[in-house]
């Protein structure tokens, strides 16, 4: 079976500053791939490079076996690859419902907007209750739900999710990971960047640890030793 996404010996960065050094990883179709690592490890840069938001200087990005290196971001979205960014990045002056409809803007998503909106409201009843509320007045947890819902409106085949639990109360984190678990059970291909390693490992099919722009550990989720992972995470051990 062709993998949903392959990153091959990727180098990328910002101007003269290279951040990723020969990064390779695979996201199997219908599986959840978790990427962990300390701040500055290059995790977000990797997701941005996949989406065409950061220039790639070497290596390749393949979606369903086809090279997408150098593709425009909107073409990557058209391929079914969607990113839910760190920090929510919702439209604060628009209503909750209008934010969701922005996710349905790509042409391929327009016909199914009613079905997809109903699905999002089923996942997140609070968004249904606040559909007419201005998004900038939502709590942090509600804003994260909205960001995830907007991404789901795009009917992703591969969903990149960057730090969904960051800054949220434990009860909201529980809700977010419940939804991620449901999406995983439904067979969505997920690439999850997350610093809450213990929670992320519970839904991980495969785990990659990044440090200083490199992948230093790559293992099946059920084979990861959490103590060993944390030792590497904090550079108390060598890979």
Image: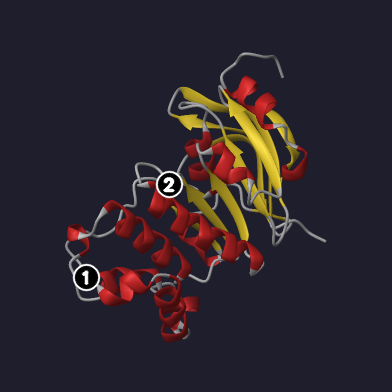
Categorize mark 1 by other alpha carbons within 10 Å: few (<14), some (14-19), many (20+). some
Which residue is farthest front?
A: 171
**Location of residue 6 in the rendering, given as x and y in whole percent from the top left corner:** 70, 48
Residue 220 against residue 151 in the figure, above or below: above
What colour scheme governs how the chains and residues are painted in the rendered image of this protein?
secondary structure
Q: Quadrant of residue 135?
A: bottom left
Quadrant where the C terminus sits is top right
Say which residue appears at 59% left-offset and 24% top-offset: 233
Tell whether label 1 touches label 2 (CB within 8 Å): no
Q: How many residues crowd mark 2 within 10 Å: few (<14), some (14–19), many (20+)?
A: many
In this figure, which residue is indicated by the disc labeled 2?
165
Lower position in the chain sequence, tag 2 or tag 1: 1
Pick the front one: 227 or 49: 227
Residue at position x 51%, y 27% from top?
A: 38
- Please give left or right for residue 216 compared with residue 149 in the image: right
Task: Residue 76: tell me if it is visible.
Answer: no
Q: CA distance from mark 2 to mark 1?
A: 23 Å
Question: Which quarter of the figure is the N terminus placed in?
Answer: bottom right
Q: Which residue is mark 1?
A: 95
At x 18% / y 66%, what residue is drawn?
A: 134
Query: Does residue 22 appear in this view?
Result: yes
Nearer to the camera, 56 or 41: 41
Q: Position of residue 80 (x, y in %)?
A: 56, 65
Identify the residue shown where x is 60% and y is 56%: 190
């Amino acid at each position: 079976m062709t993998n949903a996404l392959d990153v091959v010996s990727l180098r990328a960065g910002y101007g003269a500053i290279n951040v990723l050094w020969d990064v390779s990883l695979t996201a199997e179709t219908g599986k959840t791939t978790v990427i962990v690592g300390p701040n500055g490890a290059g995790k977000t840069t990797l997701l941005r490079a996949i989406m065409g938001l950061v220039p790639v200087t070497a290596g390749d990005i393949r979606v369903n076996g086809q090279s997408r290196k150098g593709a425009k971001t909107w073409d990557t979205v058209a391929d079914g690859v969607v990113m839910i960014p760190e920090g929510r990045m919702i439209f604060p002056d628009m209503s909750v419902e209008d934010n969701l409809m922005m996710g349905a803007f790509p042409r391929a998503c327009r016909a199914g907007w009613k079905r997809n909106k109903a699905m999002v409201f089923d996942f997140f009843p609070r968004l249904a209750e606040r559909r007419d509320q201005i998004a900038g007045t939502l709590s942090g947890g509600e804003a994260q739900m909205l960001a995830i819902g907007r991404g789901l409106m795009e009917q992703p085949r591969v969903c990149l999710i960057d730090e969904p639990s960051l800054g949220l109360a434990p009860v909201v984190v529980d809700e977010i990971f419940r939804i991620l678990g449901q999406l995983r059970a439904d067979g969505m291909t997920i690439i999850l960047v997350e610093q809450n390693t213990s929670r992320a490992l519970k839904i991980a099919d495969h785990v990659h640890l990044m440090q200083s722009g490199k992948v230093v550990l790559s293992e099946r989720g059920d084979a990861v030793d959490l103590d060993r992972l944390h030792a590497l995470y904090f550079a108390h051990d060598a890979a």
